[in-house]
Image: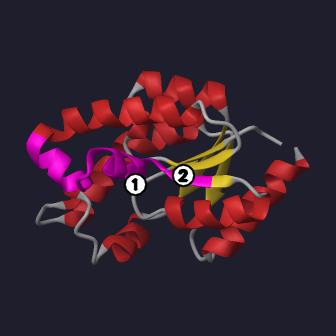
Amino acid sequence: MPESIFLIGPMGAGKTTIGRQLAKILNMRFVDCDQAIEERTGVKIPVIFEIEGEAGFRKRESAMLSELTAQPNIVLATGGGVILSEDNRRLLRSRGHVVYLQTSVDTQLERTRNSRNRPLLDTEDRRARLEEIMQLRAPLYRLEADQIIDTEGRSPTKAAQVIAEKIEAK
């Protein structure tokens, strides 16, 4: 069993929801990187984007990722853009088992439709923005993944069970 499990994938893939379930199944501690950043700074992610821009947020995200991936026995839900940094990808690769939660843009649209906490979707055409993001990030997600799980049509519990079974079978 890997020491820690890192969930990567686009917004709306279910990293937080599935991560919580997976942590319960494997008797591990669950941590959400974005929530940890919000707790540390005392403000929501959109406020960080507004004040510091995406570059400022990414710097905070990288620092938090470095801290969290050093902790043992955790299931970590990362932010969707964490894989944009080579340093972050190196941390993920070297410190745990990386699971890519794959999902369609249609599902992302459905799951994020009421979310106001996603600054990258603060745009007129959310579909176009999600497609643009996916085109850039999907190859990186696939490249870094030890395991790829399609979350389409699966409940969070079922997706977590599939991940746990594959990990335990290793």
Q: CA distance from mark 1 to mark 2?
A: 8 Å
- Is residue 37 located in the magenta-colored stretch of the structure? yes
Circles 1 and 2, Cβ within 8 Å, touching? The answer is yes
Task: Answer with the quarter of the image where residue 87 lies.
Answer: top left
Q: Which residues are magenta?
A: 30-51
Q: Is residue 166 left or right of residue 16?
A: right
Residue, disc 2: 31
Q: Position of residue 81 (x, y in %)?
A: 37, 42
Circle on res. 35:
1
Q: Is residue 118 left or right of residue 91?
A: left
Of the residues shown, which amino acid type is indicated by label 1? Gln
106 in relation to 66, above or below: below
Circle on res. 155:
none
Instruction: Please report the residue visible at 33 percent of the width from the left and 71 percent of the height from the top.
Output: 112
Crowdedness of circle 2 by 10 Å Cα count: few (<14), some, many (20+)?
A: some
Asked which secondary structure carries label 2, the reply is strand
Q: Position of residue 57 (x, y in %)?
A: 25, 39
Q: Position of residue 142 (x, y in %)?
A: 56, 41
Asked which secondary structure carries label 1, the reply is helix
